[in-house]
Image: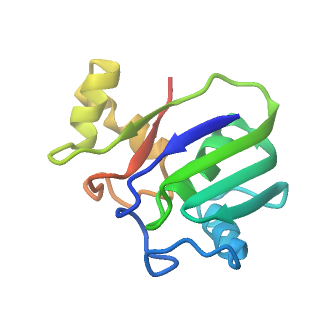
C-alpha cells in the first residue's frame, strides 16, 4: 500500500476545493479523463484523503489513477492498494516547484534537458502543453 501526499490547495477544481465523499463517481471520471479504465477501482473519500483499491492493467495506469485524483484541489493524500496485473518498474513522482520547467525537471532526473518530451508524454492527457505546469502539481517521471 502506498501513501502519497499532494498540495491540497493546488490542482483542478472538481469539488470547489473540498473532496466530497458522496461523489466518488467524479473521481472515476477524472481517472477516465487521463485515459485509464477506472472500472476495476474502488474509491472512498474520507475528508481530504482518497483511498484507491482494486486492480489496474499496468503500472502506468496505477500511477495515472493516483495522479488524476491527487492533482485535484482539496485532495491532500491518496492511499492506494492497487494490484497491478502486469509487473513493471515504478516511476518517480516529482512535485512541481515555483520556477520549474519540464526541461529543468528532465535535467534533474535524466541529466538531459531535451528529455522533457519523455515527461510530457508520460503525463498526457493530464498535461496539454509542455509549458502548462503549475507549482504543487505532481508529475510521473518514468525510469
Residue 65 in percent (x, y) is at 64, 52
Q: Nearer the viewer, residue 44 or 87?
A: 44
Give me the residue at 27% from left, 18% from top: 111
Q: Which of the 4 image quarters holds residue 89?
A: top right
132 lies left or right of 58? left
Q: Quadrant of residue 35?
A: bottom right
The residue lying toward the viewer, choosing from 94 and 133, is 94
Q: Residue at x 34, y 23 (%)?
A: 109
x%, y% of residue 88? 70, 24
21 left or right of 9?
right
Q: Locate residue 121 relative to residue 101 in the image: left or right.
A: right
Q: Nearer the viewer, residue 82 or 125?
A: 82
Quadrant of the frame with the N terminus: top right
User: From this viewpoint, which residue is outermost toward the left?
Assistant: 99
Q: Residue at x 80, y 58 (%)?
A: 42
Residue 22 position within the rendered picture, expressed as x and y whole percent measured from the top left: 71, 79
| Tally of marks | 0
Closer-to-camera residue (102/135): 135
Residue 32 percent coordinates (x, y): 67, 64
Where, by quadrant of the figure, is residue 21 drawn?
A: bottom right
Outermost top residue? 111
Q: Is residue 137 above or below residue 102?
A: below
Q: Residue at x 69, y 53 (%)?
A: 51
Amino acid at each position: 500500500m502506498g501513501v502519497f501526499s499532494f498540495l491540497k490547495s493546488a490542482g483542478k477544481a472538481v469539488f470547489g476545493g473540498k473532496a466530497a465523499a458522496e461523489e466518488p463517481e467524479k473521481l472515476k471520471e477524472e481517472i477516465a479523463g487521463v485515459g485509464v479504465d477506472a472500472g476495476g477501482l474502488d474509491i472512498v473519500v474520507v475528508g481530504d484523503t482518497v483511498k484507491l483499491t482494486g486492480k489496474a492493467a499496468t503500472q502506468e495506469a496505477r500511477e495515472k489513477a493516483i495522479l488524476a485524483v491527487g492533482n485535484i484541489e482539496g485532495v491532500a493524500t491518496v492511499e492506494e492498494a492497487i494490484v497491478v496485473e502486469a509487473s513493471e518498474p515504478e516511476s518517480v513522482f516529482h512535485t512541481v516547484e515555483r520556477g520549474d520547467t519540464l526541461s529543468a525537471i528532465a535535467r534533474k532526473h535524466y541529466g538531459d534537458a531535451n528529455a522533457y518530451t519523455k515527461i510530457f508524454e508520460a503525463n498526457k492527457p493530464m498535461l496539454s502543453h509542455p509549458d502548462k505546469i503549475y507549482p504543487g502539481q505532481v508529475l510521473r517521471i518514468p525510469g
